[in-house]
Image (cartoon, rainbow, N blue to C red):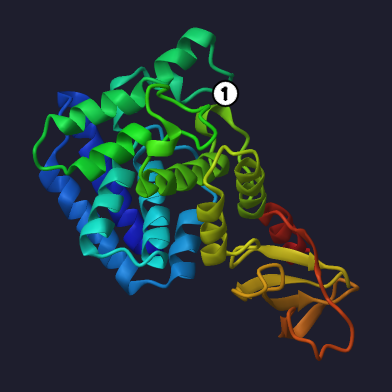
Amino acid sequence: AQETRDKLVRAVQLVFDGVRQTGVIGSGPVKETVQGVILAAETCSTHSMFRAMSEERPFDPSLGDHSLTVCMLAMIMGQALGYDSTQLKDLATGALLHDTGLLQLPPHLFHTVAPLSVKDRATFCLHPPIGSIMIESQPDFSQAVCRIVAEHHVTPDGRGYPPEISADSTAETSRIVMIADRYDELRIEFCGLQPLSSHAAIQQLLQEAELGHLDSPLVSLFIKQVGIYPVYSIVELNTKERGMITAINPATLQQPIVSLAYDEAGNPYRNPLTVDLSAQNQPFTRSIKRVIPAESWEAIRAA
């Protein structure tokens, strides 16, 4: 999945380079890239796709990396909803192009370590209509794609933008892309945000859904697909044992399957101990105490 992702990122970057230079979206290269994403979604497991999308990485000012990640996360949700081939193609295309309008704006608006000024924030908020106008000008893209680009910042509570689009009128696909977009923004240094771990980003999605900023049922669906504690997260249990999450229990998202590498004293197990936290036959109840940052885990392994 990682090799496929790297290849697709390069393809998206080439598409976006063309948009910056000409102001025109090359529909042919976009279609080829979308076909590659759909093929990857069909051949890779959800967890391998999510792992490839969730690797810690620096912010890519070309936006190619971010856009591809949003596209593939949206595809995970579209598949879970049972979308047909046309719906998946439109969802993938809209997700891939959701930030196209930003390519026509000064790069400092989204590649900054400081909060945007009021003026810059107002300019930044123009990117959905700018992108949708670019797409509307080309007959090769459907209205469904245009809606995603136009609506992906229209929040359920009506506090998003652009304000002229009613929150009650947005497409489900737009709300899907909003969630995928927000998740990846939280994971990278987008607009100066401090990157969060996968687990912390998911907790933030839950909080924002409770506040009405995101579609709550769709956030729940997203979490059911990737888990509250995503696969390959490093965790410490209440027993002080440490290990890696290897699988999700869909019925009990807070009780995944963990491969324990270190015992309560910090000594490595001779063979990793696989534990299903949802199992009722444990001699004592194990539970996740905290998620360990990747850099801390590397330090533990090196000790």
**As shown in the figure, which amino acid type bears the numbered disc 1?**
Val
Percent across and percent down for residue 300 are 77, 62
Mark 1 element type: loop
Quadrant in the picture for the N terminus: bottom left
Residue at image position (19%, 46%) is 30
Quadrant in the picture for the C terminus: bottom right
Percent across and percent down for residue 38 are 27, 62
Percent across and percent down for residue 32 are 16, 54
Note whether residue 50 is visible.
yes
Note whether residue 14 is visible.
no
Percent across and percent down for residue 131 are 27, 29
Dot 1: few (<14), some (14–19), or many (≥20) neighbours within 10 Å?
Answer: few
- Quarter of image, res 302: bottom right
Which residue carries the number 1 mark?
A: 113
Residue at image position (57%, 60%) is 223
Asked whether, in this view, residue 97 is left or right of residue 206, the answer is left
- Quarter of image, res 247: bottom right
Residue at image position (56%, 65%) is 224
For this rendering, which residue is in front, 26 or 264?
A: 26
Q: Is residue 65 above or below residue 8?
A: above
- Quarter of image, res 89: bottom left
